[in-house]
Each structure stands twice: as C-alpha cells, then as structure tokens.
Amino acid sequence: MKDAMSARLKRPTPILELLRQTIDRYHLAPALAKAEVFEEWPRIVGATLATRSRPMRFQGEMLWIEVEHPAWIQELNMLRTQLLSRIREEFPEAKIQKLHFILKK
C-alpha cells in the first residue's frame, strides 16, 4: 500500500523534460532544426537577402531557396559556402548538405 501511495505522490515531471523525452523518442530534432532554419532565415542571410529570397522546402539534405531575380541568385551562389557553413554550424541537426536556388515564378 505504501508503494502505491508513494508512486501517486511522485513529483510531476517538468514540461521541458517531457518535451525533451518526446523529441528524443520520436526523433523530431532534425524536423525542428529545419523549421528553425525557416524561422531564422533573415538572421542567417541578412535583411537585404531575406527580402529577396526565402527557403521553400527540404528534399533530403537539400534546402530549396526561392529567389526573386537572377542577379540575387548569383549573389547567393557567391555566398553559398558561407551560408552553408553558417546553417551547418547553427543547425547541425537539420543535416543540410546542399543549397539549391530557384527563380521565383
């Protein structure tokens, strides 16, 4: 009887710990990291490039980025290595290996 009562009086698990357990159990870290890339895009590329481009989708380890003009695609291509390094460093769980720029329709 005492064991059953002590089990019921056990301290509640903090919500942060429950979230961590859920993320681990369902392997959600990569999806959450990818969502963060979308959210943090303006900070990753800077204000000017953020108004000219936006991440669209992930395909495996590739991030597809829509760009409004060919000149901005060229600019992003010149920055590809730095952008990819920044994304890999800040969001390693996203496992992004390639960036693909496409012209906005």
Image: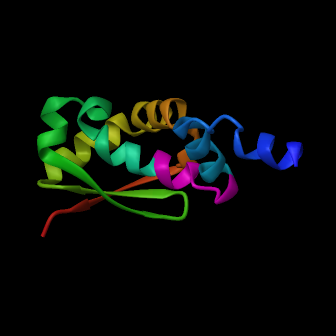
- Looking at this rendering, what residue extends furthest in the front direction? 1
Magenta span contains residue 31: yes
Question: Residue shown at 48%/58% (left/top)?
Answer: 62
Image quadrant assignment for residue 36: top left
Question: Residue shown at 13%/45% (left/top)?
Answer: 52
Name the spot of residue 43 as percent of width and height, x first.
Answer: 27, 30
- Location of the C terminus (image quadrant): bottom left
Left/right placement of residue 40 relative to residue 69 reads right
Question: Which stretch did the figure color magenta?
Answer: 25-33
Instruction: Tell me how many marks there are.
Output: 0
Residue 65, placed above or below residue 83: below
Question: Residue shown at 49%/30% (left/top)?
Answer: 90
Image quadrant assignment for residue 45: top left
Residue 90, placed above or below residue 18: above
Q: Main secondary structure of the magenta part?
A: helix
Name the spot of residue 33 as percent of width and height, x first.
Answer: 48, 45
Q: How is the image coloured?
A: rainbow
Viewer-proximal residue among 54 and 69: 54
Magenta span contains residue 61: no
Left/right placement of residue 71 relative to residue 30 reads left
Name the spot of residue 81 as percent of width and height, x first.
Answer: 45, 35
